[in-house]
Amino acid sequence: MSTRTLVINADDLGHDPAITRGILKAMREGVVSSASLMVNTPYSEAAAQESGGLSLGLHLDLARGQPVWSEFPRESLSAQGQFTEGRAAGLSAEVVEAETRAQLERFTQLTGRAPKHIDVHRHLHLHANVLEGVAKAARDAKVPVRALDSIMRHALKKLGVPTNTHFVGDTSDDPYWTLERLEAELVALPSEGVIELMCHPGYRPEKVKSSYAAQREVELATFVDPKAKEALSRLGLTPVDFGVLAPAN
């Protein structure tokens, strides 16, 4: 690829009403160009309705909440019938594929359209079995999947799934995307390829517990700050969505 393309994607839409409000603000008033929707929470439907017209992908959740696939094996869930993050490594690729297909269908039911991409809550597709299952469902649906590193990128391409060329972003005890860090990272971006910048803007969660809470408000302030838009403009970058990778349908 001879040109550089930047996708600024906000994770966790639908995780909590306050997080959703912050993400939508970052998209409508700031520079965030894409978001990924969780479809298995009590707040998913409202988030889908509130985000009409915005570019969304699926934030595949295998870490918490209930599965969407009605035949998900009960022995792989908690006593309350919930996902447990620590059990993801033991899921078969076939189970992951079926759950991914079910969440893709749920996404379309909620939004009335197909997702622009798939990424995975808590990066659980770092497990080879999870990646394989996600990739098979994504390939059939013709939906790109987020790659975190060169190993994952190679695996996805080998399976015929479009993916980003580069990935930046993280969370930590301190707010990750301060304005200063964003400006420095933008200057240092690779000179070509499709680059995904993952972020977590939002308001402090109201309904769910999250180790990344007040930090989201710092990120929200960063992505709606006029200086963020100015930095992108200086570098000739206009953030887009994952539609640049492949037609989703």
Image (tube, rainbow, N blue to C red):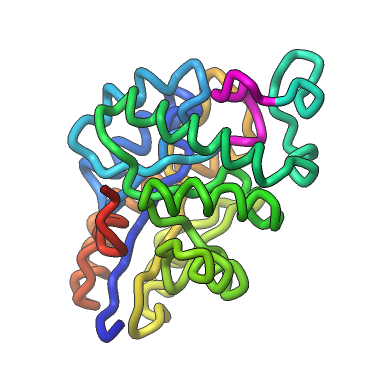
Residue located at (36% from left, 52% from top)? 142
Whether residue 247 is in magenta: the answer is no
Which quadrant of the figure has residue 84? top right
Which quadrant of the figure has residue 227? bottom left
Q: Is residue 177 found left or right of 173 in the rendered image?
A: left
Residue 171 percent across, percent down from the top left: 59, 53
Q: Nearer the viewer, residue 147 or 235?
A: 147
| Main secondary-structure element of the magenta-colored stretch | loop
Vertical placement of residue 18 versus 63, above or below: above
Q: Is residue 55 found left or right of 38 in the rendered image?
A: left
The stretch in magenta equals: 61-72
Residue 18 percent across, percent down from the top left: 43, 26
Which quadrant of the figure has residue 234? bottom left
Q: Is residue 245 found left or right of 172 in the rendered image?
A: left
Q: Nearer the viewer, residue 41 or 207?
A: 41
Q: Is residue 238 found left or right of 81 in the rendered image?
A: left
Quadrant of the snapshot with the N terminus: bottom left
Vertical placement of residue 98 versus 49, above or below: below
Residue 40 percent across, percent down from the top left: 52, 24
Residue 187 percent across, percent down from the top left: 37, 79
Whether residue 69 is in magenta: the answer is yes
Residue located at (33% from left, 23% from top)? 109
Tell me how many marks there are: 0
